[in-house]
Amino acid sequence: MKVFHGRASGTPSEQRGGTFTGTVWADPVMPATDGVTINTVFFAPGARTFWHAHEHGQILHVTAGQGWICAHGGQPQPIRQGDVVWIAPNERHWHGGSAASYMVHIAISIGTTHWQEAVSEHDYAQAGAAASAHRAVG
Ligand code: MN
């Protein structure tokens, strides 16, 4: 067992680039341990991950705002505060804020994360189109 004490006040958050589009901040909840990485991640509106997959899966717990989760070959699904997502091992996907809202989630990532290419504006726009269609249906 290890006890990880809370972040010292004044410790700067890390702004992530390279594997994210837009403004994304991430703070470790605890240091990566035994292949498990836990981060609190803030996505500004429109910001999202690149396409990627987690070797042994990932759990997302949305703690604020609203955004999108999208599996390869599927439609983007809206997620919001309180939602929990299980992403299966090696399932290609992306997640991020909506066009109009930030999103904050706790991400529990198991094993190595395999980063791929950026989510295109076209693919990201599918999320907005899905939202419009959903509203039209009522
Ligand atoms: Mn992920």
Image (spheres, rainbow, N blue to C red):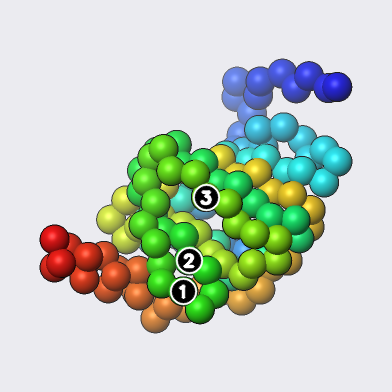
- Which one is in front in this view, the residue at disc 2 or the one at disc 1? 1
Helix, strand or loop at mark 2: strand
Does 66 appear above or below 72?
A: above
Q: Mark number for residue 30?
A: none
Residue 52 placement: quadrant: bottom right
Residue name at image x 65 percent, y 59 percent = 88
Distance, label 3 to label 1, CA atoms, is 15 Å
Residue wearing tag 1 = 74
Q: From this viewpoint, is residue 86 visible? A: yes
Residue wearing tag 3 = 85
Distance, label 3 to label 2, CA atoms, is 11 Å
Labelled pair 3, 2 in contact (Cβ < 8 Å): no
Q: Amino acid at mark 1?
A: Gly
Please name whichever residue, 78 or 66, is drawn nearer the observer in this view of the structure.
78
Q: Is residue 131 left or right of residue 112?
A: left
Residue name at image x 78 percent, y 19 percent = 3
Residue name at image x 70 percent, y 61 percent = 89
Residue name at image x 69 percent, y 49 percent = 109
Residue wearing tag 2 = 70
Beta carbon at label 3 within 8 Å of ligand 1: no
Helix, strand or loop at mark 3: strand
Helix, strand or loop at mark 1: loop
